[in-house]
């Protein structure tokens, strides 16, 4: 994967062409999401680098170059207001929670019950996950579905208990990542769509 993130210099000292970089963008994006979590991808082209953002990473310039070459000269259709989480009284500290389930039936049932109980504003169901792990001394490989849950940080304990009570696994995966910023409207929606 590291080779995907590095630009190779030609004999003239220039880096890979913009079209070559664009072809690599999906892999770089997937690497960022898997390595740093959805909450840390907060690229902004006009702001200085910020600690804790993907921008402060060594390959941030590569990402900016990829995006700039594709979107330069395009004006956004509408203004999107983004914030850092500590900057607004209209939002609450929020998290993204990963939960894996063994099949789509349990994924649908669990996702619907989480939203119905207002334990989360939204649950994305991602099919086709293959998990490799050690369980009781043996390496296991299972096809699973990943639930990506957006909720308030204060609901993590209640959400975890709900998952444990409604899950087939002895030890269900419940992993939380902080949301450090994002669309103000979306973050307000998370607050308004979940219980206090």
Image (spheres, helix red, strand yellow):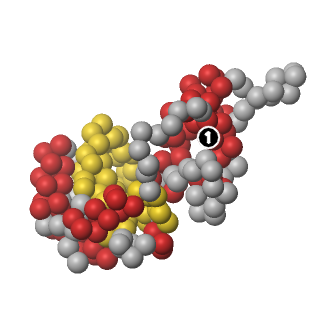
At mark 1, the secondary structure is helix
Q: Position of residue 175 (x, y in %)?
A: 37, 62
Query: Relative to 160, is 98 above or below?
Result: above
Image check: 105 left or right of 154? left
Q: Is residue 99 visible?
A: no
Quadrant, the C terminus:
bottom left
Quadrant, the N terminus:
top right
Q: Position of residue 190 (x, y in %)?
A: 29, 63
State how many labels appear.
1
Q: Residue at x 70, y 49 (%)?
A: 58
Q: Position of residue 22 (x, y in %)?
A: 58, 28
Q: Position of residue 63 (x, y in %)?
A: 61, 40
Q: Camera-side residue: 162 or 13?
A: 13
Residue that carries the numbered disc 1 in the rendered image: 63
Q: Residues within 10 Å of mark 1 (few under 14, many from 20)?
A: many
Q: Residue at x 70, y 36 (%)?
A: 6
Q: Is residue 162 visible?
A: yes
Image check: 135 left or right of 114? right
Residue 90: quarter of image: bottom left
Query: Relative to 78, is 83 above or below?
Result: below
């Amino acid at each position: 994967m590291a080779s995907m993130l590095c630009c190779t210099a030609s004999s003239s000292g220039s880096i890979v062409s913009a079209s070559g970089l664009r072809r690599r963008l999906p892999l770089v994006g997937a690497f960022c999401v898997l390595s740093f979590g959805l909450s840390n991808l907060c690229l902004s082209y006009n702001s200085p680098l910020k600690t804790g953002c993907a921008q402060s990473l060594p390959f941030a310039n590569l990402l900016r170059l990829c995006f700039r070459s594709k979107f330069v000269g395009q004006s956004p259709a509408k203004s999107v207001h983004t914030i850092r989480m500590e900057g607004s009284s209209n939002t609450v500290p929020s998290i993204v929670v990963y939960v894996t389930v063994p099949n789509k039936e349990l994924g649908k049932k669990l996702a619907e019950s989480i939203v119905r109980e207002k334990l989360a504003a939204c649950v994305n169901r991602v099919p086709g996950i293959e998990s490799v792990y050690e369980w009781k001394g043996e390496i296991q490989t299972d096809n699973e579905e990943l639930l990506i849950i957006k909720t308030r940080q204060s609901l993590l304990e209640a959400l975890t208990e709900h998952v444990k009570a409604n899950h087939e696994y002895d030890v269900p995966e419940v992993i939380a990542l902080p949301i450090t910023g994002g669309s103000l409207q979306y973050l307000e929606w998370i607050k308004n769509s979940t219980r206090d």
